[in-house]
């Protein structure tokens, strides 16, 4: 068993929050660069170039990629060889790391307390959405995701009839994109969860929307489906920021899980062009 101090985890969380806030991931930059070459209209090209310029300025000047600095999601994958040292409430300390980073780096704090009546800002962008998963992979893997309100609002859950097939799902996703994508700053990353349960499938969709764009589903059937949806979405002509063009989506990623035989859960999450993530494998001393 290897011990990792809580302070090491919270210190790493702060570093990842800063990295994610200022640095658009390399795979998203490459997808945007590729999209500029595919566009023929000057308007669409210009918008994509501005997104890339914005990412360059954010990286070089350590400025937030977007005015909406996002709701923080944190996933901790804890391997069987890891023991977390020190007493203390890990969730509370991770939330303190979020509050310290958002305050110290002048990031916009967007979380309100009571969701319906008061909607008072909690002043630290907390609570973050923290998940701890015990995995069979050795080591501790910390992942940080920042999700803006626009993309958070383009999240959908369906409990389909198990007889629904691939084409029904593709048409449903296409309708969702046509009716909603302009609300989440396209080009988007379409994350789709299929299967699991009503509470698990949104997690699958979230993980799909944050998956590296250059990684396709290892199952050929789902990989083909990712490509069909990606092509169909880009044929809509909605384009960057909804102003026309060939690039409505940068990728479509699908994650799936076994489900009850009477159900077919489906969740669709649209990540905006400012999809921010960072991760780190923390090794014991
Ligand atoms: S949807 Fe994304 S790019 Fe648009 S305002 Fe929100 S965080 Fe920023």
Image (spheres, rainbow, N blue to C red):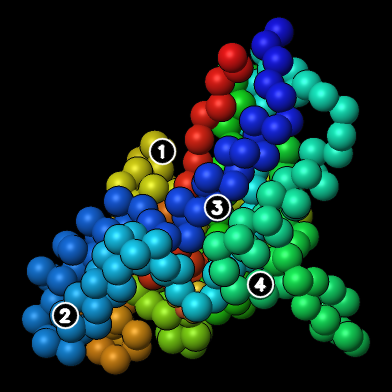
Q: Residue beneath label 3, please?
A: 17
Q: Nearer the viewer, mark 2 or mark 4?
A: 4
Between discs 1 and 4, the one toward the N terminus: 4
Q: Quote the CA–CA distance across marks 1 and 2.
A: 33 Å
Distance from the alpha carbon under mark 3 to that under mark 1? 32 Å
Secondary structure of the residue carrying tag 1 is loop
Residue located at (82% from left, 83% from top): 119
Location of mark 1 (residue): 219
Q: Where is residue 103 drawn, in percent x and y?
A: 65, 64
**Mark 2 touching mark 4, by CB under 8 A?**
no
Name which of mark 2 and mark 4 comes first in the sequence: 2
Q: Nearer the observer, disc 1 or disc 4?
A: 4
**Tags 3 and 1 in contact by the CB under 8 Å rule?**
no
Precedes in sequence: disc 3 or disc 1: 3
Beta carbon of the mark 4 residue lies under 8 A of ligand 1: no
Q: Could you say which quadrant of the image residue 198 lies in?
A: bottom right
The reply, left or right, for residue 101 in relation to residue 240 is right
Q: Earlier in the sequence, mark 3 or mark 4?
A: 3
User: What is the spatial separation of the Cα atoms under label 2 and label 3, in whole angstroms?
Assistant: 30 Å
Vertical relation: 215 (above or below) 145: above
| Residue density around tag 1, few if under 14, some if 14–19, many if 20 or more, within 10 Å | few
The local crowd at label 3, few if under 14, some if 14 to 19, many if 20 or more residues have their Cα within 10 Å, is many
Of pointers 2 and 3, the one earlier in the residue sequence: 3
Q: Which residue is mark 2?
A: 45
Q: Is residue 227 above or below residue 36?
A: above
Q: Is residue 118 visible?
A: yes
Q: Nearer the viewer, mark 2 or mark 3?
A: 3
**Residue displayed at 50% across by 69% down:** 270
Q: What residue is shown with label 4?
A: 109
């Amino acid at each position: 068993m290897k011990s990792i101090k809580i302070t090491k985890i919270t210190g790493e969380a702060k570093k990842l929050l800063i990295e994610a806030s200022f640095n658009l991931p390399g795979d998203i930059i490459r997808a945007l660069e590729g999209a500029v070459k595919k566009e023929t209209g000057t308007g669409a090209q210009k918008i994509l170039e501005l997104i890339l310029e914005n990412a360059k300025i954010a990286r070089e000047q350590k400025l937030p990629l977007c005015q909406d600095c996002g709701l923080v999601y944190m996933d901790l994958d804890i391997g069987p060889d890891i023991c977390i040292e020190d007493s203390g409430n890990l969730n509370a300390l991770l939330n303190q790391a979020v509050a310290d980073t958002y305050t110290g780096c002048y990031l916009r704090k967007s979380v309100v307390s009571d969701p319906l009546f008061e909607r008072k800002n909690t002043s630290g962008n907390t609570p973050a959405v923290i998940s701890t998963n015990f995995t069979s992979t050795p080591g501790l893997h910390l992942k940080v995701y920042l999700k803006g309100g626009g993309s958070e609002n383009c999240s959908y859950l369906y409990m389909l009839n198990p007889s629904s097939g691939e084409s029904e799902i593709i048409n449903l996703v296409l309708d969702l994109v046509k009716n909603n994508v302009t609300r989440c700053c396209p080009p988007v990353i379409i994350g789709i969860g299929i299967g699991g349960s009503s509470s698990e499938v949104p997690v699958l969709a979230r993980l799909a929307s944050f998956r590296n764009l250059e990684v396709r589903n290892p199952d050929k059937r789902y990989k083909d489906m990712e490509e069909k949806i990606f092509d169909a979405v880009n044929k809509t002509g909605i384009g960057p920021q909804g102003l026309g063009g060939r690039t409505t989506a940068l990728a479509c990623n699908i994650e799936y899980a076994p489900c009850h035989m009477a159900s077919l859960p489906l969740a669709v999450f649209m990540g905006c062009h400012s999809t921010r993530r960072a991760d780190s494998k923390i090794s014991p001393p």
